[in-house]
Image (cartoon, rainbow, N blue to C red):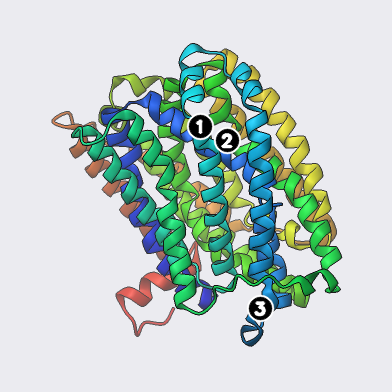
Amino acid sequence: MGSIKRQGIGSGIFMYVGLIVGFVNNSLLFPRYVGEEVLGFTQWLIELAGLFIMLASFASNATIIRFFPYFRNKSLKHNGFFGFIFLLRTIGIVLTAVILYLAKGLILEVYSKETSQYYIETYYPLLIVVLALTCYLELLENYLGALMRPRIPTFFRDVFGRLLALALILLYHFQYISLEEFIILYAWRFALSVLGLAAFTYYIGELHFKAGFSIFRSPHFKQIASYSFYSIFATLGSKITTKIDILMIPSLLNFALGGIYVVYSFFASVIILPHVGIGKIASPILADAWKREAYDEIRQLYSRTALNNLAAGMLIFVGIVINLDNIVAILGPQFEAGKYVAVFLGIGQLSHIANGYNGLLINYSPHFRYDLVFKVVTAVATIISNYIFISIYGITGAAMATALTIILINAFIQTFLFRHYQMHPFSKKMLYVIGTGILCLLINLLIPVIKQHFLIDLLVRSSIITLFYAALIIHFRIAPDISDLFWKIVKPGKKK
């Protein structure tokens, strides 16, 4: 856990700085200065590109983490592993770009709303731009993650990229650029992050473009090819499960409601932020542990990270729920219709956190093929449930459907892991975390509304609940790692 804590703190700082910038961008400035319709379109552009990245990359993101330990050798430039993946991904980008070009008519038929078709018709080439840039960005992120260097990638994705977005929003607001220029530059901003990560990788002496074609003769190649093939569809299924709501809302409703949904989904995504941050460090460690068949080490890491992440995520969830009215006051009255989106998505995210890194475990295990079955089933269920729920309940229905499928897929994977490896992350202390969260929601009902200003109410309400929650978690050692970290900061010589 020592390396996880050290790297996690560094990545966590960047993630939370990025969180603040992202909140200012997506919740305050973008909807007001540019409009929720453009916000909905740009997010649609990014998420649709994200689906096709699975094809363009041949799902090599997971392959990098899992198989890099087999080729790692700094003196031999890791046997050309990075260059091999880079070449493979470049070929995939070209092939996928051709598919997207041919699929333009079909996409326009799916998004038949007049305003939706205008944006898609006008800016369709940007879909390929975002696809290519994000594909290379993810390659560098995962490669550096495999090298145990996650902090700089976190900075470029969560801080630098969002600062660029903030600059573009302000340039548009003060009329230095037109709306067309804004949308184009918003898509191309990923290029600077790619260049920045490439420069850092070169600086540390790890940027090796020469492809190691000897990988084809490696005893691991057959396993790599098989793993990547199954991962394409499994990862695609996972993307559909978590992102199809953002893609279906413009089709069934419009981009404006899609923009409102994006704002609230951003709030919900904050809940899973600690889980994602620690996952960047835990992922290569779990992959290496599977290689060594260190099952006790995996079980311990699995359980401890799930408890710590749930404790952090529960506090964020409670903070969102108790401030729903204040959030609407900040965003504007047009956002009232979607305020429960954050609640349902939050429940789904808490379920995902409580199940720990089960997706990583099954992906790195010899039974990785079964992950495809789980993802296909839940992807189909997600599409059907979103269609039904969006038609009935609008954007709130999309959140309900997404939460339901997140819970469903985690139940499938967790049952499988326990049956085959007797692994699960659950403990009594998780019930204590949930109970503490419920208790805080009840205490919130006793706090009177401060009518002078909603920001004062938000600050006072959040402070009281945070102090109460933290006091219980730390004093009763509900999450021991969090308690130990607190006392280490407050009293460095104190031993618990």
Mark 2 lies on residue: 48
Q: Residue at x 44, y 69 (%)?
A: 199
Give coordinates of residue 115: x percent, y percent: 45, 15
Looking at the rendered image, the quarter that the N terminus falls into is: bottom right
Q: Earlier in the sequence, mark 3 or mark 1?
A: 1
Q: Earlier in the sequence, mark 3 or mark 2?
A: 2
Picture layout, residue 416 above or below residue 151: above
Dot 2 amino acid type: Leu
Mark 3 or mark 1, whichever is nearer to me: 3
The residue tagged with tag 3: helix, strand or loop? helix
Looking at the rendered image, the quarter that the C terminus falls into is: bottom left
Q: Residue at x 66, y 84 (%)?
A: 76
- Which mark identifies residue 44? 1
Relative side of 181 to 236, left or right: left
Relative side of 275 to 105, left or right: left
Mark 3 lies on residue: 78
Marks 2/1: CA–CA distance: 6 Å
Query: Badge 2: few (under 14), some or many (20 or more) residues near its Cα, within 10 Å?
Result: many
Dot 1 amino acid type: Trp
Asked if one can make out residue 348 in the rendered structure from this viewpoint, the answer is: yes
- Which mark identifies residue 420? none
